Amino acid sequence: MKKKYKFKSKIEKSYKDKRGFINILTHKNFSSCMEVFSKKKSIRANHYHKKDTHYIYVLSGKILFFYRDRKKNAKLNYGIMKKGDLFYTKNNQDHMAYFLTDTHFLAYSSEKRTRFNYEKDLIRINMHKEKKVKELIKKYS
């Protein structure tokens, strides 16, 4: 079931000199950028968005990330995201993050992330209760 992440984006090392480097993570426009820290064994997301899309850039740690399209009988996909990985979550895509270690990441969102807008746009789900998700969490924990 584990496969190459279709949602993982390539990061270019665009500028490099004796001072270091500058990476271009993406050229997309965003309405919000969040810095997030999550403790080991915690769960975030466990929902889908009606409109919002977002990129996640992992600064440190490891995330067991689950996702699937909202289509009937859509296949559950997953991947382990680690430091330096950038990945994309589209709208109408179930997604859930389980943190294998303490993890620090940046989230770039297409919609404003005020409390009101955020709650209005998302639909909560229960991926964490699904048998396959529980099995994978146990396997990688």
Image (cartoon, grey):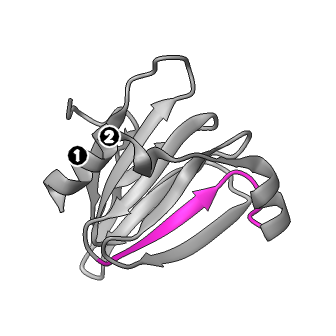
Q: Label 1, on which residue?
A: 135
Q: Label 2, on which residue?
A: 131
SS at mark 2?
helix
Which region of the structure is painted magenta?
102-113
- In the rendered image, the quadrant that contains the C terminus is bottom left
Task: Answer with left or right where residue 1 lies relative to residue 24.
Answer: left
- Residue at the outermost left position: 139
Asked where in the image residue 78 lies, by quadrant, the reply is top left
Residue 56 image position (x, y, % from top left): 47, 57
Q: Is 126 included in the stretch rendered in magenta? A: no
Q: Nearer the viewer, residue 23 or 44?
A: 44
| Residue 22 visible here | no
SS at mark 1?
helix
Residue 126 image position (x, y, % from top left): 52, 47
Residue drawn at (34%, 34%), measured in percent from left and top? 77
Residue drawn at (20%, 35%), measured in percent from left and top? 2
Residue 122 image position (x, y, % from top left): 71, 49
Label 1 packing within 10 angstroms: few (<14), some (14-19), many (20+): few
Looking at the picture, does residue 92 appear above or below residue 62?
A: above
Residue 68 image position (x, y, % from top left): 46, 32
- In the rendered image, the quadrant that contains the N terminus is top left
Q: Are marks 2 and 1 in contact (CB under 8 Å)?
A: yes
Distance between the alpha carbons at the discs numbered 2 and 1? 6 Å
**Type of the residue with mark 1:** Glu
Q: Nearer the viewer, residue 53 or 24?
A: 53
Task: Answer with left or right where residue 119 lies relative to residue 123.
Answer: right
Q: Nearer the viewer, residue 29 or 78?
A: 78
**Type of the residue with mark 2:** Lys
Residue drawn at (75%, 53%), measured in percent from left and top? 111
Residue drawn at (54%, 17%), measured in percent from left and top? 72
